[in-house]
Image (spheres, rainbow, N blue to C red):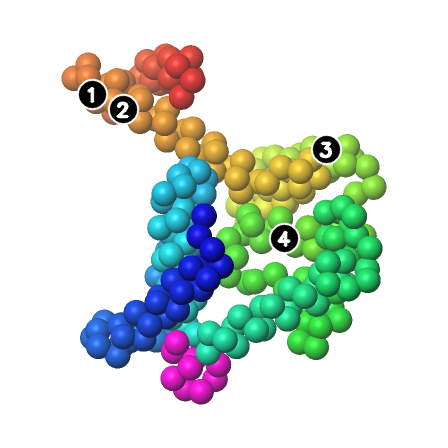
């Protein structure tokens, strides 16, 4: 791997390239925080996709794209005198040092669990820290990830199930309430109860140390593989999915499962 000196030189070259693009490229010159934001979200999801696939070459590429956006926002801010890349790095280092007193101070924390246990209390002590436990959860997070983060933050201050097995009673209770509202044909209440079902299942996943977003994405990818196999098999036979019966499609679906797709 490269030395620290080589890495710093590469980062300096990158900042120089960005400076030149901002000055000379018509597209880069006209970008603002608002115009970049949608692209930043897209690039972040592309990085997540590469991470899920564990494609090392693609991860490296997508990390570069995300880094470009981080530096671009800092570059825009430097032009208005608000802050620059040094301020971003300094503030990040200060935060990391403050939040890791077990590394840079005298606090003892021998396990990852102990570190997490003190995390929220440490953040609350920061000058500009979160005023409430849940205020640090970004509103723009996707709902599934947001639910997980809300529950995890509540756990950090002791608001959690004493025995994780008790969550299953709650899950069954929420499913029952959802079924009742479906029977009552009340779509608004059914939607609310379905949200409770999902929230309780996400809670169960957290309690059993399963990342629900990763779990759901694995199922998404599995469904895509099997459905793609179904489509390809059907095309080879010169048929159309719309003309097939559910039983015929199920048979091919089961074949895909047997192939480990």
Circle 1/circle 3 CB separation < 8 Å: no
* Residue in view at x 39 percent, y 76 percent: 75
Disc 2, SS: helix
Which quarter of the figure is the C terminus placed in? top left
Task: Tell me the crowding category of disc 3: few under 14, some 14 to 19, or many 20 or more residues within 10 angstroms, Cα based.
Answer: some
Q: Quadrant of residue 32?
A: bottom left
**Of the residues under marks 1 and 3, which one precedes in the sequence?**
3
**Of the residues under marks 3 and 2, which one precedes in the sequence?**
3
The reply to whether the magenta stretch includes residue 30 is no
Task: Tell me the crowding category of disc 1: few under 14, some 14 to 19, or many 20 or more residues within 10 angstroms, Cα based.
Answer: few
Mark 3–mark 2 distance (CA, rounded to whole Å): 37 Å
When the figure is inspected, residue 148 is found, relative to residue 24, above or below; the finding is above
Residue at the extreme left: 238
Mark 2–mark 4 distance (CA, rounded to whole Å): 37 Å
Residue 104 percent location from the top left of the image: 73, 63
Q: Nearer the viewer, mark 2 or mark 4?
A: 4
Task: Tell me the crowding category of disc 2: few under 14, some 14 to 19, or many 20 or more residues within 10 angstroms, Cα based.
Answer: some
Q: Which residue is mark 4?
A: 149
- Magenta segment boundaries in residue numbering: 75-83
Q: Which residue is mark 3?
A: 168
Q: Which residue is mark 2?
A: 231
Q: Quadrant of residue 38?
A: bottom left
**What label does residue 3 carry, if any?**
none
* Residue in view at x 41 percent, y 86 percent: 80
Residue at the extreme bottom: 81
């Amino acid at each position: 791997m490269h030395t620290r000196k080589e890495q710093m030189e590469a980062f300096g070259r990158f900042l120089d390239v960005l400076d030149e693009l901002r000055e000379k490229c018509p597209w880069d010159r006209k970008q603002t925080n608002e115009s970049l934001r949608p692209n930043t979200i897209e690039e972040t999801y592309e990085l997540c996709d590469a991470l899920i696939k564990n494609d090392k070459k693609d991860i490296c590429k997508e990390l570069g794209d995300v880094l470009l956006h981080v530096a671009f926002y800092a570059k825009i801010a430097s032009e208005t005198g608000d802050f620059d890349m040094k301020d971003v790095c300094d503030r990040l280092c200060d935060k990391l040092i403050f939040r890791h007193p077990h590394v840079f101070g005298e606090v003892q924390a021998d396990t990852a669990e102990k570190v997490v246990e003190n995390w929220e209390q440490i953040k609350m002590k920061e000058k500009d820290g979160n005023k409430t436990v849940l205020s640090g959860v970004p509103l723009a997070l996707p709902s599934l990830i947001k639910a997980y983060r809300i529950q995890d933050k509540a756990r950090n201050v002791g608001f959690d199930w004493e025995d994780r097995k008790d969550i299953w009673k709650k899950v069954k209770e929420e499913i029952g309430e959802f079924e009742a509202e479906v029977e009552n044909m009340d779509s608004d209440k059914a939607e609310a109860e379905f949200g409770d079902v999902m929230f309780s299942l996400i809670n169960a996943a957290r309690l059993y140390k399963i990342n629900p977003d990763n779990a759901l994405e694995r199922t998404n990818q599995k469904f895509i593989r099997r459905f793609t196999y179904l489509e390809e098999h059907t095309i080879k036979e010169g048929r159309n999915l719309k003309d097939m019966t559910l039983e015929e499609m199920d048979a091919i679906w089961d074949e895909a499962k047997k192939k480990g797709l």
